[in-house]
Image: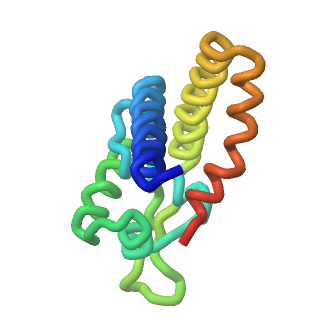
Amino acid sequence: MNDNKEIQFASDLRNAITRLIKKLRKESPTGSQLSLTERSTMALLYQNKEMLPSELAAAEMITNQSMSQVLNHLFELDYIIRTASTTDKRKVNISLSVHGESTLLQFRHERDEWLANAITKACTPEEQEMLKQVIKPLNKLVDLK
């Protein structure tokens, strides 16, 4: 493959993945009231159980002030809990509330269910097998540093 074909392949792949991600975002009625950053923040809290606002901001690559707005909205929706740090009273740990965790799992389920149905409807069994085979290389791309 020459450079132009490789770049065109990368562009086509990026476009397909971007369109799929946008489609998946629309397929979750539960998650529609949240921004991408709010959903991503909830996912980080689910993975890590508890984080400082500054850690969340760094992970999301946004300012502390922007993260404060995200956390305020999630708090208003009863999706997060703020707990004073036991080691430093100036710090506050953030974690998902029970309601926040169930909401996160609900919108993940809605997207997974839509995608599973779409794959069954749109793809032949051979294409479904091809999709299964591409998961590992896609994860390698995501994990590349």
| Location of residue 129 (image quadrant) | top right
State whether residue 108 appears in this view. yes
Q: Residue furthest left?
A: 65
What residue do we see at 30% from left, 66% from top?
62
In the picture, the quarter occupied by the C terminus is bottom right
What residue do we see at 34% from left, 33% from top?
33
State whether residue 39 appears in this view. no
In this view, 68 is above or below 20: below
Asked if residue 103 lies left or right of residue 19, the reply is right
Percent across and percent down for residue 105 are: 60, 38
What residue do we see at 46% from left, 23% from top?
27
Asked if residue 50 lies left or right of residue 125, the reply is left
Asked if residue 55 lies left or right of residue 95, the reply is left
> What's the colour scheme?
rainbow
Percent across and percent down for residue 136 are: 71, 50
In this view, 14 is above or below 96: above
Q: Residue furthest front?
A: 2
In this view, 115 is above or below 87: above
In this view of the protein, which residue sits in the foreground, 96 or 17?
Answer: 17
In this view, 35 is above or below 62: above
Percent across and percent down for residue 94 are: 47, 65
Q: Residue furthest bottom?
A: 87
Percent across and percent down for residue 97 are: 53, 51
What residue do we see at 60% from left, 13% from top?
122
In this view of the protein, which residue sits in the foreground, 57 or 71?
Answer: 57
Exactly how many numbered labels are in the figure?
0
